[in-house]
Amino acid sequence: MSSLSKDLDKLTYEEIEEAFKTYNDDKEQIEVIKKAYEFALEKHMGQYRKSGEAYIYHPMNVALILTSIYADYETISAGFLHDVLEDCDCTAEEMEAEFGSTITKLVQGVTKLSKIHFSTENEYLIEYYKKIIVGMSEDVRVIIIKLADRLHNMRTLWAIPEEKQKEKSHEALEILAPIADHLGIHKIKSELEDLSLRYLKPDVFYDIAEKLNKTKIERDKTVYDMQQEVSDLLNDYHIPHEIKGRAKSIYSIYNKLDKGKKFSDIYDLSALRIIVDTEQECYLALGIIHSKFRPLPRRFKDYIAMPKPNMYQSLHTTVFGIDGYFFEIQIRTHEMDEIAENGIASHWSYKENGGSDKAANLTNTTEQKLQFFKSIIDLSRDKMSSEDFVNSVKDEVLNNNIYCFTPKGDVIELPKGATPLDFAYKIHSKVGETTVGVIVNNSIVPLDYELQNNDIVKINTNKNSTPSKEWLNIVKTTQARNKIKNFFTKNEREVYIERGKYSLEKELRKRKLVFSEFFSDENIKKICEAINCENLEEIYLTVGNGKTTPNGVINVIEKKDEAVVPKSIKTIPKNIDADIIVSGIDKVKVNLANCCNPVFGDEIIGYITKGNGISVHRMNCHNLENMDDRTIDVTWNNNNNKRYLTVLMIYTKTSDNHMVDLIQSISMININIEGVKTISRDNITYELSCYVTGIEQLDKLILAIKKNSFVEKVERAFR
């Protein structure tokens, strides 16, 4: 059987070498390729594939596929050798001695990927994606070889059981074809998709193929006639060109049919590709064609002025052609056509050979525009669970993306469904954090607007503005979400530390204790041991977030016999309904002071009034300065679900009335407004009275108000 398959397979090394020579005739590089072939031939001697042919024909076919996308000599050499380390008696040291470190590392990368159990099940996806990302970030050529390897395996998929055929087809369609698409390797992407459909849905595949065959003669004649007319037209204007018909892949037709289109309604079954010498001639050819064939509205795309991030460039238009057929026409230069067909793999050959200025520019563009890989590397740096990482790579990197522009024309790549906040954070964390408004295509849009392909996005910022926690429900990208979370983690810690420091120092002043003496190294050590902290900053944090009271900290030093009872575990009698719990007293009249309007979560203290029970104040209330002798410890009842009145002073930078804008930003947070008054009319100041559930909602409200560009500062009012 093996001898028969050898006779059937006519592929020879000479064919592969000739294919390489069509774009690179460097003799030294050809010698390396030949040496790699001979080395692989020797190592695979006596091995056969499940399809029956000698094993060497697999790496030979992989190498041939790589020449079709103009891969460099190192990639083709590694293509010959890609299974040697895994399947043969050969060590990495032996290979490196023969071929050097670069080729060996490429083979090791492919070997690493080959050991992964590919699957579309989520538990296996996790390991698969993580390892494939490592491979890509080290050298993208590892993935290019893997794609060629899988393509040849798909061509011989008939040799394995049906269940395995479907499994491999799922992997190719859901994992590898999207990667080929992002690399711009159209040839491999299209064939992987068609072969996958053939095994996953054979009835659909052959039905489409039959329909194409039935209309083939008529379509071929129409395409030929249209080709002649367009060619004559361009010749009349002395534009040198090549023109050819372009077949639409079966899978792309299936995709359109699956979305509800009729076979007869697919515009680009009939298609032409026009290749000219210069970029200027692309636009001239477009104008000439439109002068004779009416273009279909909204079907024109200019990927020359605005290339895709994988560097694809072309003009696309659909016109009413001869015999009533729609024709999609693509117009591009020779260099653009090579990139469109072969993707970034071809650019190593440019780099190797020196090439023209255009080639050098293409290489630079390659290095600048690979946002695909930058996106993956950015994601891998963010701390997230394995499943989040996989989902974010699948959703944000491998799925269909949109491409938006800054006002200066820089391209920003985002997943579908992304918002202006995702766009802002993609530019820079600081831009995202200080976003106050967005203009898309010269129109103001809300922050939760869903960006569309080719949108021009201008982000308005205010250096005093900060993010809102509501943004976590708006952003689409994991990167933006993590940056918002990190901001609040850091920001809330700083707020709590400052709040704790203020409260503790306030209590020390009340007790007439000297700061420097109280915060001696010995005392700090004792306090840290008592309340399980590491340093003074953490002591402030524990007081600021309410886990320990200022009195509790001071009593560690001043009253060593008293236990420190964190608020979070203080015992609350079950029958207490009051907002405030007064230490040692079951029933007493308690009022929240109108001078400072404390809300749930504030640091508070009670004041024993004459005949009116206990008045509860915020710790920093100025009215407490003369009340030291009649204060009493009070705490919030964590079981209450009430709302509390608070008053804010909102200072603006303008004399314009922004009352409507102010109320709109407040209403987004579900706040009950009691009233808004205008206090000053030069630079307008507003007094806002409203009800909040506690300090957390109040902080959110203040942040929302500060996001307005006209707001200078916001303060809680004291009377």
Image: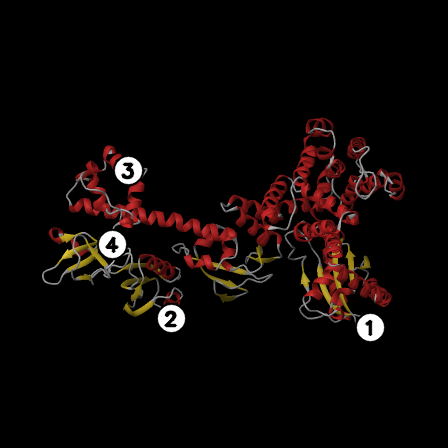
Q: Mark 1 Cα within 10 Å, few/some/many (few <14, many 20+)?
A: few
Relative side of 709 to 80, left or right: left
What amino acid is at disc 4? Ile
Q: Considering only order in the chain, which callout, 3 or 4, is on the residue closer to the N terminus? A: 3
Q: Nearer the viewer, mark 2 or mark 3?
A: 3
Q: What residue is shown with label 4?
A: 572
Quarter holding residue 279 = bottom right
Q: What residue is shown with label 3?
A: 528
Q: Considering only order in the chain, which callout, 1 or 2, is on the residue closer to the N terminus? A: 1
Q: Quadrant of the C terminus?
A: bottom left
| Percent x, y of residue 20 | 80, 41
What amino acid is at disc 2? Val
Q: Nearer the viewer, mark 2 or mark 4?
A: 4
Q: What residue is shown with label 2?
A: 660
* Vertical order, 45 against 435 (above or below): above
Relative side of 168 to 437, left or right: right
Assess whether mark 1 and mark 2 are in contact (beta carbons under 8 angstroms).
Answer: no
Q: Considering only order in the chain, which callout, 3 or 2, is on the residue closer to the N terminus? A: 3
Q: Considering only order in the chain, which callout, 1 or 3, is on the residue closer to the N terminus? A: 1
| SS of the residue under disc 1 | helix
| SS of the residue under disc 3 | helix
Q: What residue is shown with label 1?
A: 323
Q: Mark 2 Cα within 10 Å, few/some/many (few <14, many 20+)?
A: few
